[in-house]
Image (tube, helix red, strand yellow):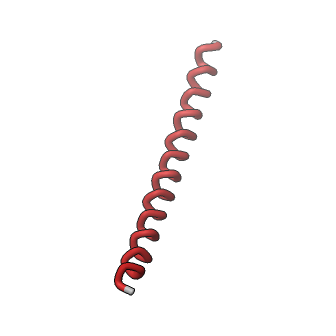
Amino acid sequence: STGQSQLESGVKLTHATSDLLRKIAAGVLGGLAERVKPGEKHQSS
């Protein structure tokens, strides 16, 4: 059953990709939040 193993590896790849995208999105959003806060302080000083 070659199709079965291909399907299983495809599912693993999909999970790995969505996990990676989630980490990237969290990192980007976290980075933006950190950038906005100091940016406001710099503008006022």
Residue 29's image quarter? Answer: bottom left
Residue 16 vs residue 8, the one in the foreground: 16
For the C terminus, give its image quadrant: bottom left
Residue at 36% across, 77% down: 40
The one nearer the camera, 32 or 12, is 32
User: Which is nearer the eye, 1 or 22?
Assistant: 22
Q: Is residue 10 above or below residue 31?
A: above
Q: Is residue 22 above or below residue 12?
A: below
**Point 37% across, 79% down: residue:** 43
Asked where in the image residue 13 lies, by quadrant, the reply is top right
| Numbered circles on residues, count | 0
Judged left or right of residue 5, residue 39 is left
Q: Along the horizontal axis of the image, is 38 left or right of 14?
A: left
Residue at position x 35%, y 84% from top? 44
Seen at 56% across and 22% down, the residue is 7
Residue 20 is situated, as x and y percent measured from the top left of the image, at 55, 46
Between residue 4 and residue 20, name the one nearer to us.
Answer: 20
Q: Judge left or right: residue 6 versus residue 44.
A: right
The spot of residue 37 in percent (x, y) is 40, 75
Of the 4 image quadrants, the one containing the N terminus is: top right
Answer above or below: position of 38 versus 8. below
